[in-house]
Amino acid sequence: MPIELQSKICTSCGIEKPMEEFSKNQYGKDNRILRRPVCKECYSKKVKISPKEKKLYEAENPRPKIGENFTCPICNKTKIRNFQNEIVLDHSHIDGSVRGWVCSSCNTSLGKFHDDINILQRAINWILKQGLKLFSF
């Protein structure tokens, strides 16, 4: 039986806080509750999508239906949409503007880089610096 943590460190403010300060996000293996990596206080400061802009965007650019193909504009992978959260509406946390539909993996990746072009560029530079290392399995 996994040990449940009593606190965690917010990935935004860097402060260790009680677990209750982090919103429930989803359920993991064995119905284990997973919490957001950002505390409630920091999460509340993020700029959300304007409901009006979201509605307008979705009217002109509907999300692919379950069973339809979707090609992510970031990773360029074509996926058949099987679940509700596989394709998400990406937006800027700086100004709330809608950027478009992307796969959940790419959306999460952008979020982990905090929509920061400098961090993304450093990641690119890191990969380029390391060179293309081929692994044989």
Image (spheres, rainbow, N blue to C red):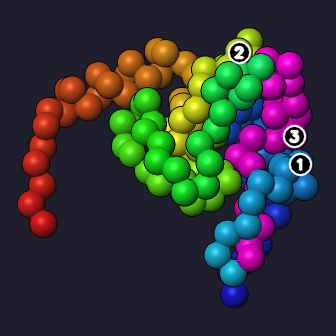
Instruction: State the residue lying farthest toward the top.
Output: 95
Measured Cα–Cα span from mark 2 to mark 3:
22 Å
Identified at 67% across, 54% down, the residue is 84
Mark 1 belongs to which amino acid?
Answer: Glu
Judge from the rendering whether residue 137 lies leftward or rightward of residue 57; answer left or right: left
Q: Secondary structure at mark 2?
A: loop
Decide which of tag 1 and tag 2 comes sooner along the chain: 1
1 and 2 marks in contact (CB < 8 Å): no
Measured Cα–Cα span from mark 1 to mark 2:
27 Å
Disc 1: CA contacts within 10 A as few (<14), some (14-19) or many (>=20): some
Judge from the rendering whether residue 36 lies leftward or rightward of residue 88; answer left or right: right
Asked where in the image residue 55 lies, by quadrant, the reply is top right
3 and 1 marks in contact (CB < 8 Å): yes
Judged by depth in the image, the label closer to the viewer, 1 or 2, is 2
Q: Which residue is mark 3?
A: 40
**Residue 40: image location, x then y, percent:** 87, 40
Instruction: State the residue lying farthest toward the bottom.
Output: 1
Q: Nearer the viewer, residue 130 or 28?
A: 28
In the image, which disc is placed on residue 134?
Answer: none
In the image, which disc is placed on residue 97?
Answer: 2
Measured Cα–Cα span from mark 3 to mark 1:
6 Å
Mark 3 belongs to which amino acid?
Answer: Lys
Mark 2 belongs to which amino acid?
Answer: Ser
As drawn, 122 above or below 26: above
Decide which of tag 2 and tag 3 comes sooner along the chain: 3
Judge from the rendering whether residue 79 lies leftward or rightward of residue 16; answer left or right: left
**Residue 28: image location, x then y, percent:** 67, 69
